[in-house]
Image (cartoon, helix red, strand yellow):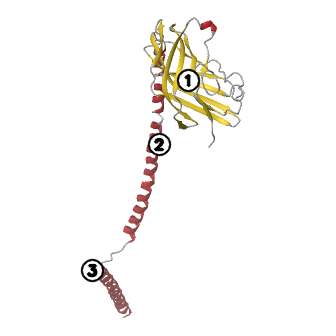
């Protein structure tokens, strides 16, 4: 497991691995009000728990008041925390970054959090002082009322030749440490009518989808008539067969067969007798003539 030197120094010092000190831009310095807070934190280094973090000391700079319809700028003027670095490695410009998440509250709040970010504009020699640029963030103001800020978490990410070092410190509690009074008209009613305007647009699309399954159902009845003509074809053949059987069939019962044979015999016998009688009569007639 690699070892890193973790440095914890007083807030007055700005040395690599520890305290940060910066001021708001000169143009806004007269309007900025500063608020300081020290809170206990729980930290991790590269995802592993670290119990030697101590407290997080923050000096937050915000204007005392602001107007709706503008963007509010928030600054970290001073921050003391502990993070991990490789002390024998330099830190190139832009290879160290800090992220401070603030908890936002109050009647004028339109979001739950605000993220402030900063980087190191210059290279830092091994074991040298790490100097940060501005750590700032902004948010739009649309509601009048009070706007409060508390410390959420601090993340320091340092990239060096021997590898990255990521330290995350989260306070055990996040009390509000700064307040801004927002004045002016409420800007939120303007987007409200646009919301209902978006609702009718999906509505026509939905009914348009409903007729789609209806033609698919019409395909089912088309299959039904196709089956009906095929059904009559079957009975036609059976009728022909039945009709043929009825016309050429003879009785097959014993009684009927016996009667039929007897009738035929009588008919034949009668015919023979008639022929014999005729012959005899004719013979007798010839005899009489001859005589």
Q: What's the CA distance linking mark 3 and mark 2?
A: 60 Å
Q: Which residue is nearer to you in this view: 83 or 8? A: 8
The disc label shown at residue 100, or none: 1
Which residue is identified by label 2? 219
* Secondary element type, mark 2: helix
Q: Residues within 10 Å of mark 3 (few under 14, many from 20)?
A: few
Q: Does residue 31 appear in this view?
A: yes
Q: Which label lies toward us, 1 or 2?
A: 1
User: Is the residue 133 above or below the residue 183 in the image?
Assistant: below
The disc label shown at residue 255, or none: 3
In this rendering, position of residue 82 left or right of residue 197: right
Q: Residues within 10 Å of mark 2 (few under 14, many from 20)?
A: few
Residue 102: where, in percent of width, then height?
A: 51, 21
**Mark positioned earlier in the residue sequence (1 or 2):** 1
User: Is the residue 246 above or below the residue 276 in the image?
Assistant: above
Mark 3 near mark 1, Cβ–Cβ under 8 Å?
no
**Mark positioned earlier in the residue sequence (3 or 1):** 1
Furthest toward the bottom, the residue is 291
């Amino acid at each position: 497991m690699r070892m890193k030197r973790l440095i914890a120094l007083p807030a007055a010092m700005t040395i690599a691995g520890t305290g940060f000190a910066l001021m708001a831009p000169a143009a806004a310095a007269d309007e900025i009000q500063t608020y300081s807070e020290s809170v206990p934190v729980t930290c991790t280094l590269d995802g592993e728990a670290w119990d030697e973090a101590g407290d997080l000391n923050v000096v937050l700079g915000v204007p005392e008041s602001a107007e709706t319809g503008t963007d509010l700028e928030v600054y970290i003027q001073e921050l003391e925390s502990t993070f991990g670095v490789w002390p024998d490695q330099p830190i190139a410009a832009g290879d160290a970054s800090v992220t401070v998440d603030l908890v936002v509250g109050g009647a004028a709040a339109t979001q739950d959090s605000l993220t402030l970010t900063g980087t190191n504009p210059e290279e830092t020699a091994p074991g040298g002082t790490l100097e940060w640029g501005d750590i700032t963030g902004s948010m739009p103001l649309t509601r009048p009322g009070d706007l409060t800020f508390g410390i959420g978490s601090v993340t320091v990410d340092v990239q060096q030749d021997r590898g990255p070092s990521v330290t995350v410190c989260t306070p055990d509690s996040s009390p509000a440490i700064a307040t801004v009074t927002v004045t002016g008209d409420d800007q939120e009613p303007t987007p409200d009518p646009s919301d209902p305007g978006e609702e009718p647009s999906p509505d026509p699309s939905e009914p348009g989808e409903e007729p789609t399954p209806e033609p698919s159902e019409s395909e089912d009845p088309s299959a039904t008539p196709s089956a009906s003509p095929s059904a009559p074809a079957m009975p036609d053949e059976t009728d022909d067969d039945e009709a043929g059987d009825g016309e050429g069939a003879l009785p097959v019962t014993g009684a009927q067969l016996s009667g039929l044979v007897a009738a035929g015999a009588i008919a034949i016998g009668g015919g023979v007798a008639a022929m014999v009688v005729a012959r005899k009569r004719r013979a007798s007639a010839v005899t009489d003539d001859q005589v």
